[in-house]
Amino acid sequence: MSIRHLSLIALVAAFSPAFAATPLAAQLTAYASAARSENPAFAGFSAQRGEVLHRTEFGRGKPDSPACASCHGQDPRQPGTARSGKRIDPMALSVTPGRYADPAKVEKWFKRNCDEVLGRACTAQEKGDWLSFVASR
Amino acid sequence: MKMTLRPLVLVALAAGFSALVLGSARAGGSHFFPPVSEPLVREECGSCHLAFAPSMLPAASWRKMMGELDRHFGEDATVDPEIARKITAWLVANAGDSGGSRYGAKLLRGVDAGAAPQRITGLPKWVREHREVPDWEWRHKEVRSKANCVACHADAERGYYED
């Protein structure tokens, strides 16, 4: 049920004209096809899984940043704080609408931050889940 | 004659005085460092920390820093090589011992010519200026890091570092 449900949401999102035209939607589509080739059983992205990813303390990257939430905070609608003390604008698309408009920038930060939190690159599945999470908030 | 000249002299004196004051205010005395105006540098150097003014370090410092971005104060801050080249050129052109020397000269006092200090907070002049800040203030949760200028200098983003 849940997988069918999720694919339905993904379908609706992909075909709603306002969303389909955004660079974020295009990037999610690209991650989806990458995820399918990483795993033939790929069944769409999940904002719920993205939220779990966001909060999980992996502790395999930098000691300062066991989780995404260490710097970004648990609630993506709230600002975060970088190690330097600088404020990080909220990750939730509804609060910071300009975010995720540049796919190269999104990739740059996945590369840096996945390394610092998970100690490895994120999979396409993880990237898509997390983006779905912040886009849904 | 004397009576009519005197106000004129006064006006001239006042004008001269304010020109002097305004002139040094525009230069900001020793506490103004023009903020990063270049959008590319603002974006790439200003997302994790305040985009530090190029006049706060000598050109040699920026060259060294941009060559070691994979080990940038404990972070991998590498950027696309073409972007790195543009950023380096801009920082070097506006460094405290080149294009930005009228702003950076005082802060760079006591730095040997050719030296490439990496920490603005390690410059002798910086250390002297902050010697009265107690340890607990640095550890305050709103400060966290000596690189967080805006925690105390509210106008740092605009280049002003008065007390």
Image (cartoon, rainbow, N blue to C red):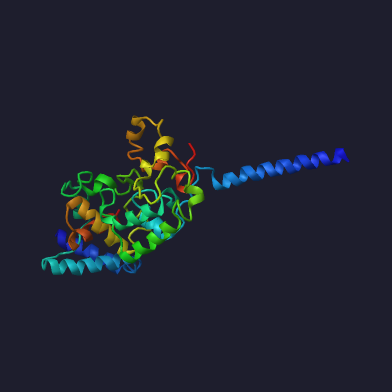
Point 35% across, 50% down: residue: B116
Q: Quadrant of residue A43?
A: bottom left
Near-viewer residue (B51 or B15): B15
Point 40% across, 39% down: residue: B124
Near-viewer residue (A39 or B76): B76
Near-viewer residue (A98 or B52): B52
What x and y, as percent, mark residue B3? Answer: 86, 38
What x and y, as percent, mark residue B110? Answer: 42, 42
Outermost residue to the right: B1
Res A97 visible:
no
Left or right: where B151 falls relative to B75: right
Near-viewer residue (B57 or B109): B109
Res B156 visible:
yes
**How many numbered marks appear?**
0
Left or right: where B111 falls relative to A137: right
In this picture, is B20 found above or below B94? above
Point 29% across, 66% down: residue: A25
In this picture, is B151 found above or below B135? below
In this picture, is A98 found above or below B27? below
Looking at the rendered image, the quarter that the N terminus of chain A falls into is bottom left
Q: Quadrant of residue A8?
A: bottom left
What x and y, as percent, mark residue A5? Answer: 19, 61
